[in-house]
Structure formats: C-alpha cells, structure tokens
Image (cartoon, rainbow, N blue to C red):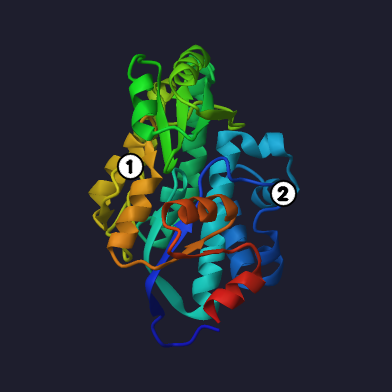
Amino acid sequence: MATDEPPTTLDGTAFLFPGQGSQTVGMGRAFYDDWPETRAVFDRLDDALEIDLPGLCFDGTADVIQRPSNTQPLLLATGIAIYEGVTARFDVDPAAVAGHSLGHFTALAAADAMDPATTAALTYRRGKCMERAAAADGPGTMVAVLLADPDEVAEACSTRDDVGVALYNAPKQTVISGTAEGVADVQERLEERTSARFRELDVGAAFHSPVMESAVDCVETAMAEVTLREAELPVVSDVTGERYTDPAVARRDLTTQITSPVDWVRVVETLREQGIERFVAFPPAGVLAGLVERIAPEAECWALETPADAREVFA
C-alpha cells in the first residue's frame, strides 16, 4: 500500500498502453471490482464524459465499443485507472512510458503531462472528429500485411495517394490503411510480388491514413483548448520513436499521428536502447505484449490482465 515515501522508480521497466483494435467488452473489470483506487478513477472520468463509461466498458457490445468516440475514452480510462491503481498500491513508477496510437494519450496522462479527466474528454472529441471524417470521406479499411518486408509494403503504397502504411507493428507485420479501392489495389500488387498473408481489421475506419485528413483541423481545435505540461516521466513517441518530455513534441505528434503511421517497432527499439529490459503492458494487454515479444524476444514482457498479475509483477 502507498506510504509517505516517494515512489520507487523501476529502473529498466517501461509501461505500455494499447490503442484501438485491442478493446474488449469487460476490459479492466477485475481491477475495477478489486481495487478501490481504480474504481475511483473510473468514476471520476465518468463524470467528465458524455457517455456511460463503466456501463459501456463492462456491459456494452462489441459493435458499440468499436465506435471511435466510445473506444478511445474507454481505452484511456481503462489504462489510466489501472495505472493509478498500480502506482498507489505498489508505490512504483516506471522508468519510461509509451503508447500505441490512442495509447500515446494514456502514456501522457500517466506521465502527468495531461490531466486524466481532460484527456478522457479530449479522446471523446477526437473520436467524434474521426467519425465525421469517415462519414464524409468513406470509412475506408485497414488490412494487416504479414510476412512481407515493410519496405516492400511501403513501396506498394507509394503508387497511390489514398492509401499508406498505418502501423509498423513488428518485423514483417505492417498494416495498410486507406480507401477500400486503394487498399485492394495495394493488396493485389503485394500478392503478385510477395508471399504475404492478409487479414482485414475490424476497426470501423481507416485510421492513420489520408482518409482521416479532414479530422486534422477538428482535432487541432480540440487540442488547442487543452493544457499540456512537461512530462514527469520520459515518453517515447509512436510517430518518431523520439524519447521526450517536452509538451511541444506531444502536441505535434498527437496531431501528426492522425494521418501518419505508428512506428511501434521504433518505439520498442528506442526503449531497448535506453536500457529498458522489462515491458509491462496495461489492459487490454495481449496485443502489445505479443508485439514486444516479436520485436525484442530477449526482453522480459508482462501482460497485466488481472490484479493477480499485478501482484506477481510488482509485489
């Protein structure tokens, strides 16, 4: 339990927060039920939102929680509420934090660069911006490309202006995103040239692609009303792989990532270069833990799914 002593920094440990596509109905419920600290954060964030946060998170349907204006604050709330539960109960801080796409917002809230309630409200507005962009320009599609060299995938995308690489998730695991026509054309090109396998993602819109261009001004307007401050923990950008605490970098990258790819490979490589040997993925934790194991199989990686997992990692 927390004491009056400052938290212990876990040298060599980074905390990771997931993005859209990782959401599941019931995520974080075990922590909410077991930890009063987590429940208090959920309730506080619920007051800042126009949605029923616990109701959607624990009892919603897969279709409803996939809607960006629901997904984004739900993931933010789950991550930061469990993070605050961990730091309060075990008196620990990580050496660094990082987040995948939407998870970059959670990482900044964890690093005290943004107020959690303000961040939750911002992600709700961000989701609305993306929904409007998808409605105006077509929802588009996202397809995972497996077993192909990332440079080959990027080259195939470069022939069109309506599709691009959205995610560099792991070696030979990328995601392309854009209009349905553009993605189909790129997939056909890759099928002719490589032995790649493909899997369409059930995410509801073409994130990190030109389809989201009309969301940029909308998100910038929302972010202009938000105060960002110097991060108290080092953050690694999912856009550039840069390790930073400067709020100007956060403001730049949180807008840039709307139409630019997430380079998760570079995030993990930067953390390894900075001496990180242990990665702790926060709920819903399975996706990021799996990616880290592919990028840095020699590193120690934990997926927090239950309070029992947290006790094993931190106690």
Q: Taking 197 as reference, is 193 left or right?
A: left
55 to 113, vertically: above or below:
above
Task: Find the residue positioned furthest to the bottom.
Answer: 4
Task: Tell me which corner region of the image, top left, top right, bottom left or bottom right, holds residue 260.
Answer: top left
Task: Tell which of 206 and 43 is nearer to you.
Answer: 206
Residue 269 percent across, percent down from the top left: 33, 54
Which residue is rendered at x = 62% and y = 31% of the image? 202
Task: Select label 2 or label 1 by which is in front.
Answer: 1
Q: Report how far apart the C-alphas of labels 2 and 1 lie in the structure.
A: 32 Å
13 vs 76: above or below: below
Q: Amino acid at mark 2?
A: Gly
Q: Are marks 2 and 1 in contact (CB under 8 Å)?
A: no
Q: Residue 84: x percent and y percent?
A: 51, 67
Which of the marked residues, 2 or 1, is nearer the chain's N terminus? 2
Residue 247 spot, x, y in % from top left: 27, 52
* Residue located beneath label 2 in the image: 55
Give the class, few, some or many, for how many residues have Cα within 10 Å of label 2's Cα (few <14, many ≥20). few
In which quadrant will I find the C terminus? bottom right
The residue that appears at 54% across and 59% down in the rendered structure is: 282
Rendered image: mark on residue 274: none
**Residue 62 position by quadrant:** top right
Circle 1 packing at 10 Å, graded few (<14), some (14-19), many (20+), is: many
Q: Splitting the image into 4 quarters, where does residue 30 fall?
A: bottom right
Q: Nearer the viewer, residue 127 or 172?
A: 172
Residue at 51% of width from left, 83% of height from top? 2
Badge 1 marks a residue whose secondary structure is loop
Quadrant location of the N terminus in the rendered image: bottom right
Mark 1, residue position? 239
Q: Amino acid at mark 1?
A: Val
Q: Can residue 279 be seen in this snapshot? A: yes
Q: What x and y, as percent, mark residue 256? A: 32, 35
